[in-house]
Every structure is written in C-alpha cells, then in structure tokens.
Image (cartoon, rainbow, N blue to C red):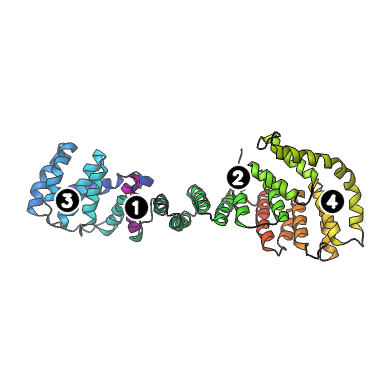
Amino acid sequence: MKFVSKFALALSVSALTVVSAANAFQEKPAKAKKGKEAAPPKKNYSKPFIAAYAPAVDALNKKKDVAAAKTFLPAVIAAIQNDDDRYEAGIFAINVGAQLKDFVIQEQGIDLMLASASTPSDIKTQYMFQKGAIAYDGKRYADAEKHMTAAYNMGHRKNNIEYLISTSQSQQGRDKDAMVWLAKAIDSSKGSAELQKPYMVRAAVLSAKAKDYAGAANWYKQLLKAENNPDYWHDSLAYFDRSLTFNPEESLDLMRLMRTVQGLRFQQEYSQYLESLSYIGVRYPAEAVAVLDEGFAKGVISRSNVSFSERYAEAKARLAEDTATLAGTAGPARAPNARPILASLTADSFYSHGNYQTAKELYDSALKKGPVLDKDGKDQTDRTRFRLAMSKAMLGDYTGAKADFAMLTGANRKAIAEYWTLYIDQKSGGAAAPVAG
C-alpha cells in the first residue's frame, strides 16, 4: 500500500487550504531541511480498507474524476478498521470536499482525522481550527466557538483566532464574554496597527452596547493616541461624558474641548453646550453666539428650531453690552485687595470672548492670591487652575498647560484633563498627525 501513503503525504498540506474564514492556512509550507530526515511511521492499513480505498484513490488521482471519487466515499468510510484507516479516509474526504467545495464532506473528513490516534498532534490542532472555521463560515457560531476554543487550548495562535472566537460569542449575544476574547485579540495583535485599529473599534462598540461607557471611551482614547481623528474624538468624549456625572462647569470645559477638536456632531451636543454656558441666567453671550453660528453654518442645528433661535436672540441682545463693559472689568479684578474669586470669574468672561491672554493673566493672579473661594466658601481653586491650563493650551503654551493640568486634585477634572493633555500632545507633535477630512 505504498501508493496510499504517498497519496496521504501529497494531500496532507493542500487539504489545509479549504476554509475561507480569516484566510485560514495561507502560509506557505516550510521548506524541508537538508540532511537525513526521520522516516515517517509505518502505516498499518486493514485489508477491507485497502480494497475499498484503492478504486477511490484511482478515481481521484489517476482519472481526475472527483465526482466518481465521491461515490466511493461511503464505502471507504464503512471499511475503516483502525486509526490508520481513519486517518487516510479523513484526508481523502477532505480533498474530495475541497475540490467539490462541499463543506459537509470536508467536515466529515476533519472529524475522521480528529478521531484518529494516527493524526499528528500539530495537524490535529490545525484541523480543529479548520472545523471551527467551517462552522464560522456557515454561521454556526456556537460550534465555531467550541472548536476554535479547543484549537486555542491545543496551542493554535494563528488566523486571528481570538477575534473569531470573540465574534462567535458576540453573535450569540454574549458580549461580556466576547470582550474577554477581544482583549486577547488586541494583545496578540500588538505591533500590527492594521489589526489593532479594527479590533479596538470593535471593543469600543461592544463596550457601548453593554452600556460600559467608560470602557467605550477608553478604547476610543487608545485609538486617539495612534490617530488624531475627529470621529474618534467625538465618540471618545461623548461616551466619556456619559460615564461620569459632571457639574455644569465641568461639562462646559468638556464641551469646549469637543468644540476645539471639531467633535460637535449632533443637536443634543449643542444643546448641552448652551445649557453649560447658561446654567445661571444668560452667561457668556459671546461664546453662545459663536457656538450657535458654527452650528447653523454646519447645518447641524437650524434657525427654525425655536429653542436655538430664542437662545441666539437672547445671547445676541446681551452681546453688545457684555463686549462694551468687558475691558473695564480687568482693572478691579487685578487690584491687590480684590478677592481671588473676582479675578477668576472675570477671567471666565475674557475666556468666553476668546481673549485667552487676559484670561490667563487673571486666572494666574487669582491663584497667586491664595485659595479661590466663592461666595459660599467653596474652594474653586481646581476650576481656576483648570481654566488657566486651558488658556495656556489655546495660546500654544503646551508645556505650561500640561504642568497646570498635572496639579489638579478633583477626580472629575483630572479625568477631563487627560483628554486635554492628549489634545496638547497631538498639537505639539506628540501623537499621530490629524487625519484628512
């Protein structure tokens, strides 16, 4: 039966290219090392199997009639007496199925090989993955997960197996389990930006689906560290906003960053920005008008919307007086006997007008005078220092801004500062260049 063994050896590699999932097994076979090689173990085929197998091999190998070879398959399988028979029959079935593009026959052959003690362990591992890949392509995700997980536990680490297992679990509605395997996929893809980027996007989507908004924000933040992309900025900040409870002042400074990175995309975000600007009466009319004008120009919000049009009219009515009186407020705020909070609040007005230089000077003055306490005795030092850092960032003093952000003590503001610091890193060349468009 030498011809049978030769047939098996010839097809044992080509049989591994039959599945489409994840471009399975597209690697070129390793070249044989020069020198004397160990002889393959002797096969012990049973006589009934030889009798059934010989005409099948002849039909496939000599006559090149795969349809005829398929008709012999039931008899070949029925004649199996031992593990060597089973191994050989498995290879035959896989190759018949591959040529006919019949995954049922291929899987039948794989099952025979997996059940045979004659199949080398490394080949079993590959075929276990292939069995999972066939199930994946057939959208039998529970089977795909089962067999790919078995292959992984047997040592298979190719073909993006972690990602395929994760996707199989997600398709079964088990996103929490899918996240565990997706994290493994991301870890295994380190060094391959081509793989890591879609994996991290998938991780962000799954996190958001599971209402893990902090997780979603973090994954987008990881993407931002590699690519300065306005879409990533929007999604990261939007999910970050949903992950924590911010007071209006904190929300305002987060929305200011979203505007700075061109991340304002939806009507509700413009509404939130305006709410943060106007939570006590009509504050910062200059900034409100500027934000609304941008939204109108982009077509994201409409002047026909009563809420936006009324706010615009109100802010516009206040703008002239606010602008006219602004310059005169700086002197009293700088006075030696002025309370620190006056300098801080006056700086807020200058910041809202885009006068970041004067805002910076006044915030700095407030901090130098001592604790910045409001009329209720609450410490506003963190808020003041945060806005000093923002002013420096807008003026291009990135080193100074980062130093001030690093001095914050409040949990929320420290968390927001991480995003401002990332923005600074990108502006100063510490991260990837912005994506066009």
Q: Position of residue 179 (x, y in %)?
A: 46, 56
Residue 358, which numbered label? 4
Q: Secondary structure at mark 4?
A: helix
Q: Viewer-proximal residue, 386 or 124?
A: 386
Q: Residues within 10 Å of mark 4 (few under 14, many from 20)?
A: some
Q: Earlier in the sequence, mark 1 or mark 2?
A: 1
Residue on which the image places disc 1:
142
Q: Earlier in the sequence, mark 3 or mark 2?
A: 3
Q: Does the magenta portion include 200?
A: no
> Which amino acid is tagged 4?
Thr
Q: Position of residue 61 (x, y in %)?
A: 17, 40
Q: Is residue 233 left or right of residue 49?
A: right
Q: Secondary structure at mark 1?
A: helix
Residue on which the image places disc 3:
5
Residue on which the image places disc 2:
229
Q: Viewer-proximal residue, 29 or 253?
A: 253
Does the residue at mark 4 contact the one at mark 3 (Cβ under 8 Å)?
no
Q: Which residues are magenta?
A: 133-151
Q: Residues within 10 Å of mark 2 (few under 14, many from 20)?
A: many
Q: Quadrant of the C terminus?
A: top right
Q: How much space separates mark 3 and mark 1, taking CA atoms?
A: 35 Å
Q: How much space separates mark 3 and mark 2, taking CA atoms?
A: 57 Å
Q: Secondary structure at mark 3?
A: helix
